[in-house]
Image (cartoon, helix red, strand yellow):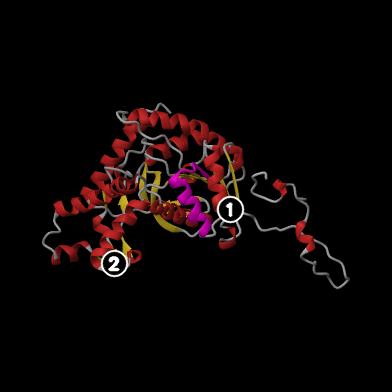
Amino acid sequence: MKKASSLSELGFDAGDASSGFFRPVADDAGLYTPTAHRRRLTKVSVIGAGNVGMAIAQTILTRDLADEIALVDALPDKLRGEMLDLQHAAAFLPRTRLVSDTDLAVTRGSDLAIVTAGARQIPGETRLNLLQRNVALFRKIVPAVAEHSPEALLLIVANPVDVLTYVAWKLSGFPASRVIGSGTNLDSSRFRFLLAEHLDVNAQDVQAYMVGEHGDSSVAVWSSVSVAGMPVLKSLQASHRCFDEEALEGIRRSVVDSAYEVISLKGYTSWAIGYSVASLAASLLRDQRRIHPVSVLARGFHGIPGETDVFLSLPARLGRGGVLGVAEMELTEEEAKRLRRSAKTLWENCQQLGL
């Protein structure tokens, strides 16, 4: 029997099959006049159906954030398998149309396009060579997505996310407010988790941010960490003599290294980034105006030069229009200095790409 994902593909009549099951409601004159469904449907595209892309698609699906999800990948068999696997769970999930193709045209009309596709580093390869290969990949992806969905929001997840968000901005021609990197949204969650475990509270009640690069030079903003509106650092330093500068750096390093630990144990990260990106999708598509530390165009903030088109993470208000504003955080001089150092490192990488 032919392999198919619908009865119509198996040769059954694809006409109005529901007409035999449902009788229309007549008006007072005994007539029935069908009307078009006027609600605007929401479409999300996920480009890259690897472990990260599928964790994102699955989480968006279970949270009922989209009416249609389009999956794109270069491997047709794996792509179709992933789509079928999700389709077969239809009886347990919100009604969402799932489509897939190796052709980016399937993303047409997207409200949100999430790019997880990226080249993996080859042993012995330099960071710059990896970046150049990713730029070549993005040259194929980003302009096509922009052409098929000129009003979409672009959410970049592929690493190194800050530099690739800059690349996507340059290649798409979109305003900076509609090109966002997942940035340190997940790093901040890891930071909040560690503090919540120590304080024995729910991580949702901990306000704590990692900013700057999603990577080695990220900055833990200890000065603004709070629980229930109460500053945490002063309390911890008063009750724990070990909370000195060395200990704080050790905690920041633990946050940065936590992804490497997961990768060493299971081979990849997936679930946490899936939930992280789904939370960003919810804020964007549902116009929630929530604050997330995401990679945005940061020129002019905290002493970053105005001529520097660098993208890095700062707390941003997200809504249906993309980045609606960036919070003017109060940083200590040391935190601001580290943030500028992070920006300088990222900008040097961007300048080597020749975009």
* Residue 243, image x, y percentages: 15, 59
* Residue 217, image x, y percentages: 26, 43
Of residues 33 and 7, the one nearer the viewer is: 7
Q: Is residue 72 left or right of residue 12?
A: left
Instruction: Name above or below for residue 265 compared with residue 73.
Output: below
Q: Which quarter of the rendering shows the N terminus? A: top right
Residues tagged 1 and 2 counted as in contact (Cβ below 8 A): no
Residue drawn at (46%, 54%) of the image: 278
Q: Secondary structure at mark 2?
A: strand
Magenta stretch bounds: 45-62
Location of mark 2 (residue) = 227
- Is residue 47 rendered magenta in the image? yes
Instruction: Name above or below for residue 311 compared with residue 239.
Output: above
- Is residue 355 rendered magenta in the image? no
* Residue 347, image x, y percentages: 33, 35
Of residues 98 and 86, the one nearer the viewer is: 86
Sequence-earlier tag: 1 or 2: 1
Location of mark 1 (residue) = 87
Q: Amino acid at mark 2?
A: Val
Query: Would you identify the image quadrant in which residue 27 lies?
Result: bottom right
Count of marks placed on residues: 2
* Residue 93, image x, y percentages: 56, 61
Residue 95 in sight: yes
Sort mark 1 into few (<14), some (14-19) or many (20+) by Cα contacts within 10 Å. Answer: some
Q: Amino acid at mark 1?
A: Gln
